[in-house]
Image (tube, rainbow, N blue to C red):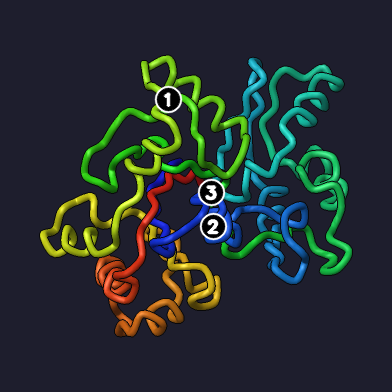
Amino acid sequence: MFALAYVLIPSRFASLQAELDRALAPFKRGGEESFPREKLVFHDATDRLKELHGARFRYNRDGSLSHLGDHGAPFDLAVTSLKEHFSACALDRFEGTFAEIEPDFDEFVRRFTRFAKPDPTTRRYGDWLNPIGYWDWWDLGGCFNGVITGERRPAAADQHISSGPSRGRMVMASLAEALGASDEGERAEIEANVELVETLKAAAVRKERHSVPSALVLPAGCCPDEYRWFDRIEWHDIKPGTRRFLGAPPDADYRSLVLAAYDRFADHVAAAVAFHF
């Protein structure tokens, strides 16, 4: 999925790429391949794997799986391994539980899920992940090209300012090119996707739709990173520390917090980034 974030940065900068990298780096989704262990939190999957072990499902002749219950987490399954098992058993249809296929829980996890072994530190199954990881990749403007200025434009075929190469971005770039998008160049890209915060504040007072994005990122270094990103994505909670930093009451809603940020950082600019999450 894609959403639009406005990233608040100083009004004077030598490199917009460098400013955005600095502001957004703490919010990259990932684990030990991207962050030191002390920045990560263990997400325990053991209980949901136990539910999955006892979950009822159907293996169909076409190789598909029908999950008959609402327990467990099917996305943890190593579906290819499961299909290989049924093929080796010469079964083209099965209805039952995973526990009937492999009664031993640890062996089930090893053979038929994405977890090869328990975490050596916790001795539980799970992942070490960035607890404030909100994006997989981002582009300046991207599919929201021009929105921050109130003049939406076709996405550029080639993004000059972004989080770097990714398979998803290459797919989107190919789509944009197929739709006839043009490469406006880095300068035009910046002009279309950077706006004065005071201009956004005035637009917000007029209740113009483009003035309030899906997510707002406060300037790097202004407060602890875990308070700098807040959004209106329904399964994300706004940290109490964000409200305290912005001088907002504990029950302040998202729009109120955006306006408080615009007040506090009226001398900054906002860069609009499309982020994938």
Q: Please report contact status of discs 3 and 1: CB closer than 8 Å, yes or no.
A: no
- Mark 2, residues whose alpha carbon is within 10 Å: few (<14), some, or many (≥20)? many
Seen in the picture, residue 158 relative to 211 is either above or below; the reply is above
Q: Please report contact status of discs 3 and 2: CB closer than 8 Å, yes or no.
A: no
Task: Kindly report the distance in space between the C-alpha atoms of the residues bearing marks 3 and 2.
Answer: 10 Å
User: Residue 98, image x and y in percent?
Assistant: 74, 41
User: Residue 148, image x and y in percent?
Assistant: 29, 48
Q: Dot 2: what SS?
A: helix
Residue located beneath label 2 in the image: 24
Q: Residue sitting at 37 percent across and 21 percent down?
A: 181
Amino acid type, residue under disc 1 in the picture: Asp
Residue located beneath label 3 in the image: 17
Q: Nearer the viewer, residue 219 or 18?
A: 18
Left or right of 98 in this view: 217: left
Residue 143 seen in the current view: yes
User: Residue 131, image x and y in percent?
Assistant: 61, 65
User: Residue 222, image x and y in percent?
Assistant: 48, 76
Amino acid type, residue under disc 3 in the picture: Gln
Task: Kindly report the distance in space between the C-alpha atoms of the residues bearing marks 3 and 1.
Answer: 17 Å
Amino acid type, residue under disc 2 in the picture: Leu
Q: Earlier in the sequence, mark 3 or mark 1?
A: 3
Q: Residue sitting at 71 percent across and 53 percent down?
A: 49
Q: Nearer the viewer, residue 92 or 153?
A: 153
Q: Residue sitting at 57 percent across and 46 percent down?
A: 136
